[in-house]
Image (cartoon, rainbow, N blue to C red):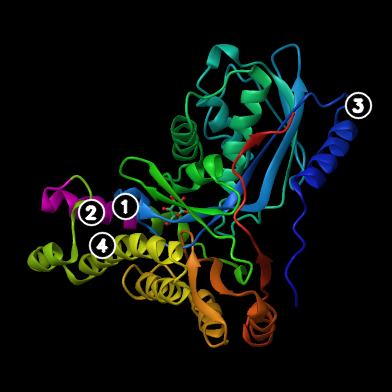
């Protein structure tokens, strides 16, 4: 089994234009935008604790094409969904069917320049696998926001503001109390760079990954366990509660020594959750330094430790992700392998030498009990207006 062919943004644009012409009676496309999915190299469940994350934007992306319409109806067709969704940009409501449309409605409702909004017809196409833990939702929100920037000619004041608006879209319209990582990297990702984001103040440090001997392999387990809905907010609440008990604004203010001193304030489970967050924040800033100095061995060890902590202490992994990681780690040339994203299914990310990629994909195809999909990815650019 080999890695998937990832279509270029141009190829997605061409396909989207064709579908647009077929759906809207040959009308020409006058505006278009794209936004990528992401993979997080390390720093999981740290963003909502004001910690560090270290993601990169993917060549997998969502493209939206369209044009303005007169009147009070917008019509949106998605390549992967049946039917056309209709709404008025001036009267957006949360909580309606179909569910997927809430991501775009949330982006519209949180657009910075409500006065400038006009109705439109649009078509959406995406190469980001849905429910795969590589931020298909952020790609949808950010591509819609960027499309609106093109349509109205009104740009967000900054990348931070744009990402925060899209995060709010996800909170209010999709009911997912996510952190800022996914939307932020989708907005400001950069070709050849992973980005260390300090979620306390949204400052960034870009670290180059363009070593030709290195590869980043994403393996989709193609499983998504239903638990996700309730487990994410419950982990997040446990962290917020713990910070409150300690009288600190967030778990970012804690280090392993201080945690030890306060050990008796928490039950076993909460202690494990906090231990993950504290150790993961430490690992993530170390990992950025390791990558910068091309110490891939250390980076890989930190990735492995991150996975083990997510599995044992934060308890957000699952049998399929553990198996994928175990198989990859046995292959020579693999520096490290871990689950990526929220957990309970989705993808793993593996840092390895380019030469060992075929071998890893072969081993996983032979040994993994599920049906994997592979993506070999370079860090890519964030969202942009295409037309
Ligand atoms: C999801 C959320 C992110 C982040 C990760 C876990 O992807 O959208 O904000 O919390 O889980 O690191």
Q: Please count the marks in the image.
A: 4
CA distance for labels 2 and 1:
8 Å
Q: Based on the displayed image, in which of its 4 quarters is residue 301 positioned?
A: bottom left
Q: Are marks 2 and 4 in contact (CB under 8 Å)?
A: yes
SS type, badge 1: loop
- Is there any visible trace of residue 178 in the rendered image? no
Q: Are marks 3 and 1 in contact (CB under 8 Å)?
A: no
CA distance for labels 3 and 1:
49 Å
Residue wearing tag 4: 278
Quarter of the picture containing the N terminus is bottom right
Q: Based on the displayed image, in which of its 4 quarters is residue 88 positioned?
A: top right
Choose the circle earlier in sequence order: 2 or 1: 1
> Disc 2 or disc 1, which is closer to the eye?
1
Choose the circle earlier in sequence order: 1 or 4: 1
Choose the circle earlier in sequence order: 3 or 2: 3
Q: Is residue 228 magenta?
A: no
Residue at (44, 61) in percent of width and height: 292
SS type, badge 3: loop
SS type, badge 4: helix
Choose the circle earlier in sequence order: 3 or 4: 3
Label at residue 251? 2
Residue at (24, 52) in percent of width and height: 252
Residue wearing tag 1: 51
Q: Position of residue 348 (x, y in %)?
A: 54, 69
> Disc 3 or disc 4, which is closer to the eye?
4
Q: Which residues are magenta?
A: 234-248
Q: Are marks 2 and 1 in contact (CB under 8 Å)?
A: yes
> Disc 3 or disc 1, which is closer to the eye?
1
């Amino acid at each position: 089994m080999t890695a998937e062919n990832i279509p270029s943004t141009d190829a997605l644009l061409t396909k989207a234009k064709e579908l647009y012409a077929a759906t809207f009676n040959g009308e020409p496309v006058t505006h278009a935008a794209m936004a990528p999915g992401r993979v997080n190299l390390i720093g999981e469940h740290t963003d909502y604790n004001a910690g560090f994350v270290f993601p990169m934007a993917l060549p997998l992306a969502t493209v939206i094409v369209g044009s303005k319409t007169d009147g009070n109806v917008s019509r949106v067709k998605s390549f992967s969904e049946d039917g056309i969704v209709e709404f008025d940009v001036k009267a957006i409501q949360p909580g309606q069917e179909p569910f997927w449309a809430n991501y775009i409605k949330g982006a519209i409702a949180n657009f910075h320049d409500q006065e400038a909004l006009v109705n439109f017809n649009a078509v959406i196409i995406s190469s980001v696998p849905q429910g795969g833990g590589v931020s298909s939702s952020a790609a949808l929100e950010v591509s819609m926001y960027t499309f609106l920037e093109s349509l109205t000619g009104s740009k967000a004041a900054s990348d931070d503001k744009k990402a925060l608006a899209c995060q709010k879209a996800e909170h209010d319209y999709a009911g997912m109390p996510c952190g800022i990582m996914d939307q932020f990297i989708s907005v400001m990702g950069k070709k050849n760079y992973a980005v260390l984001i300090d979620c306390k103040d949204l400052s960034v440090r870009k670290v180059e990954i363009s070593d030709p001997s290195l590869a980043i392999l994403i393996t989709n387990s193609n499983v998504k366990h239903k638990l996700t809905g309730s487990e994410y907010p419950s982990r997040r609440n446990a962290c917020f509660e713990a910070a409150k008990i300690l009288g600190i604004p967030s778990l970012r203010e804690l280090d392993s020594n201080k945690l030890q001193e306060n050990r008796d304030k928490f039950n076993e489970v909460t202690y494990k959750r906090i231990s993950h967050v504290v150790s993961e924040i430490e690992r993530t800033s170390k990992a950025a330094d390791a990558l910068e100095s091309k110490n891939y061995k250390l980076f890989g060890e930190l990735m492995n430790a991150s996975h083990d902590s997510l599995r044992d202490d934060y308890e957000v992994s699952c049998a399929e992700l553990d198996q994928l990681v175990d198989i990859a780690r046995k292959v020579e040339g693999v520096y490290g392998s871990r689950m990526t994203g929220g957990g309970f299914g989705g993808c793993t990310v593996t840092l390895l030498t380019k030469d060992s990629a075929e071998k890893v994909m072969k081993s996983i195809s032979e040994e993994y009990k599920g049906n994997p999909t592979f993506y070999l990815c370079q860090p890519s650019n964030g969202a942009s207006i295409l037309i």
